[in-house]
Image (cartoon, rainbow, N blue to C red):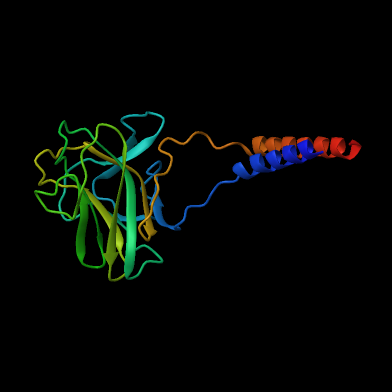
Amino acid sequence: MAGWRTKLLLIAGVAALAVPVAKANPILFSDSFQSSLNDGNWITLGSAQIVTDPLNSSFKAMTFATGGSGGNLFSNVIAGTSAGTYTIGFYFYANCGFTSQCGAYIGIDDPGEMWEASDDGISFPTPNVFADPSTWTWETFTFTTTDQFNVKLEDFSGSPHNAPDVVYFKDLEVVSGSSLPAPVLFPSAVPEPGSIALFSTGLLSMAGVVRKRFRRI
């Protein structure tokens, strides 16, 4: 009898694993850069453009057609933000041929200009500096603001190794607090509703068989 109870518990455990786990901090802003920049997230596009992911042609990424200064891609003011602590995360890749100073900068306006992170940190210093990786790398930085804010990015024309289409971003997210785990870089296809229903039906059928056998003991 105890064996069937154990099987029931195992089935319940499998069903629980199929339920997605929510992130600890709600996402206040996000853009995967898998579709048009004219999606309501961005108020100024500059030379930003969506292109085929240089490392995986099945996906897309955001890059800049020309260098700039003072900000190139500006988001709308992010709803739900105020004075406090926040974290920005994003996947980053660079192919300027160097390990630093390709020109990637990211910051906020709250409303004062605050450049928070870059792959340069010398041409224009920033409190956070990240390397220019040869593969997609998840980067995060935490900052404090005094008011609502927007996000801005650019390929800084003043960086020594700046050039068109050399810095790439994807899966940009903003949360309150200081914790932001990396999302799946190349997500597989989401199961179709029919597949989910079939999986659930199978679990229920297994549970029914176990109950019938349990009653015969």
On screen, residue 2 versus residue 196, left or right, reads right
List x then y, in percent, for residue 192: 61, 37
Q: Quadrant of residue 34?
A: top left
- Seen from the viewer's position, the closer of residues 40 and 159 is 159
In this rendering, the answer to whether 207 lies above or below 122 is above
Q: Quadrant of residue 152?
A: bottom left
On screen, residue 29 versus residue 149, left or right, reads right
Quadrant where the N terminus is found in the figure: top right
In this rendering, the answer to whether 144 lies above or below 162 is below
List x then y, in percent, for residue 80: 41, 66
**Residue 104 visible within the image:** yes
List x then y, in percent, for residue 150: 30, 61
Count numbered badges in the picture.
0
- Seen from the viewer's position, the closer of residues 36 and 19 is 19
Residue shown at 26%/60% (left/top)? Answer: 108
- Seen from the viewer's position, the closer of residues 166 and 147 is 147
Q: Quadrant of residue 84?
A: bottom left
Quadrant where the C terminus is found in the figure: top right
On screen, residue 27 versus residue 145, left or right, reads right
**Residue 76 visible within the image:** no
Q: Residue furthest front?
A: 2
On screen, residue 92 versus residue 20, left or right, reads left
Residue shown at 59%/36% (left/top)? Answer: 191
List x then y, in percent, for residue 216: 91, 36
Q: Residue furthest right?
A: 216
